[in-house]
Amino acid sequence: METHAASNIAATSVVLNGEVLTDNNANVTERGFIYIKNSGLWNFGTDVAAGNGSGAYSTQLTGLFPATTYHVKAYATNAVGTTYGQVETFRTMDTLPVVTTTEPSNISATTFTSGGEVLALNSTGLTARGI
């Protein structure tokens, strides 16, 4: 059982990747992932099923929090029990602020007037603004 690195990491979504290397002669009836925000609290993790059988598999998660660290491990279940892959960690991307820019006016050979407005902050707050 292996947990592979997450891919297509965005602000609120990610693709999780795992692989069932062998079923040990008992068909894998469920495979998937368990993920958490706080390392070590696996009893409070969220399970996401991703089919059955051996081989590589993946699933897309949505509805995640921006700029947040998550821990994930792949799992597989057969008649013998459940086994887990190693823990992998990923961090979702930050969201960008939403801004507008004012059309330049009072244009001369060396100066002009412009401005803008911050319409929405990113998830970590506004750290700088300017033209």
Image: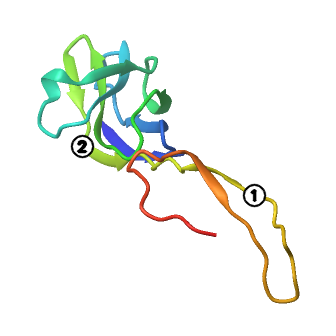
Residue 96 in the image: x percent, y percent?
54, 51
Q: Earlier in the sequence, mark 1 or mark 2?
A: 2
Question: As shown in the figure, which amino acid type bears the numbered disc 1?
Answer: Thr
Rendering coords of residue 1 (x, y %): 30, 36
The circle on residue 87 is 2
Q: Which label sits on residue 1? A: none
Q: Residues within 10 Å of mark 1 (few under 14, many from 20)?
A: few
Q: Residue at x 86, y 76 (%)?
A: 107
Where on the picture, by quarter, is residue 131? bottom right
Report whether 4 appears left or right of 102: left
Q: Give the residue displayed 17% in from the left and 22% down from the top.
A: 44
Residue 120 drawn at (x, y percent): 54, 43
| Numbered disc total | 2
Query: Is residue 32 visible to the viewer in this orientation of the structure?
Result: yes
Which one is in front, 102 or 83?
102
State if disc 2 and disc 1 touch (CB < 8 Å).
Answer: no
Circle number at residue 102: 1
- When the figure is inspected, residue 5 is found, relative to residue 50, above or below; the finding is below
Residue at left offset 30%, top offset 37% = 72
Label 1: state its secondary structure.
loop
Frontmost residue, 35 versus 86: 35
Please state if 69 lies on the left or on the right of 53 as rendered: left
Residue 41 in picture, x, y percent from top left = 12, 31
Element assignment for label 2? loop
59 w.r.t. 90: above or below: above
